[in-house]
Amino acid sequence: MALLECIEIEPGQPATASVIWLHGLGASGHDFEPIVPELQLTADLPVRFIFPHAPNIPVTVNGGIVMPAWYDILAMDIDRKVDESGVLTSADAVDALIEREIQRGIASNRIIIAGFSQGGAVAYQCALRHPQTLAGLLTLSTYMAMPVTLSDANGQIPVMVSHGTMDPVVAEELGQRAVASLQQMGLSPEYRTYPMEHMVCLEQIREIGKWIRERLTPDA
């Protein structure tokens, strides 16, 4: 499998951790590039940010128009009729990026997987099933598209879920369902909401930055 094309933002000194962040439907890896400085990570925590571009595929609910998508959206009830093979293919592609980070010298437990909307659905599938211990899973305005078997390695993975209370694209109820599924797996996800639609806000980004620092700062 060819590696996904990505935007990469390197820290000022050699990276000791990585965040792989997946964008939403119709967007690109550039979508979340501007948030990196807003996370306010300090220079003593050198984190490489990787923002992959989804492949261009026809999207059924958009009349078959070709656009960047991690998987096809088959119906408007996005949580009921799912392109499971597409989700799994994209999760495999993210697995390949994780493996590349490991080959570059980043330990798996120093890698966070993040995703917004459609990208978050892939992040759930990728991170929870991954056979090596990861540093964390961050999902924004998303849902769990399909069942996933939690790996032994990630049986205690830290998870932060955030959602807009006025989201007209992915209803907050779907975010809550994902949290319930995580809890049924024995995980203890943090769940945070913001008075916004299908988007991100500065308060949320600041809290994500704090969460990333807590996950990746070595113990004193």
Image: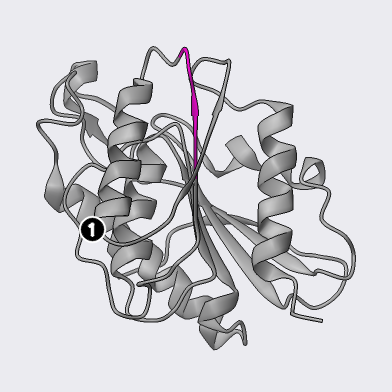
Q: What is the secondary structure assignment of the residue under circle 1?
A: helix
From the viewer's side, name the closer residue of 51 and 108. Answer: 108
- 62 or 39, which is in the foreground? 39
Is residue 170 visible in the rendered structure shown here? Answer: no
Q: Which quarter of the image is occupied by the C terminus?
A: bottom right
Question: Which image quadrant is residue 57 in?
Answer: top left
The location of residue 92, given as percent across then percent down, is: 29, 65
Nearest the viewer among 114 and 213 is 213
Q: Quadrant of residue 172?
A: top left
Q: Residue at x 70, y 62 (%)?
A: 214
Q: Which residue type does callout 1 highlight?
A: Thr
Kindly identify the residue that appears in the image at 53 percent across and 87 percent down. Answer: 103
Q: Main secondary structure of the magenta part?
A: strand
Local packing at callout 1 (Cα closer than 10 Å; few below 14, some 14-19, many 20+) is some
Indicate whether 77 appears above or below 94: above
Circle 1 is placed at which residue position? 89
Quarter of the figure with residue 177: top left
**Dividing the image into 4 quarters, which one contains the N terminus?**
bottom left
Q: Which residues fall within the magenta stretch?
A: 161-166
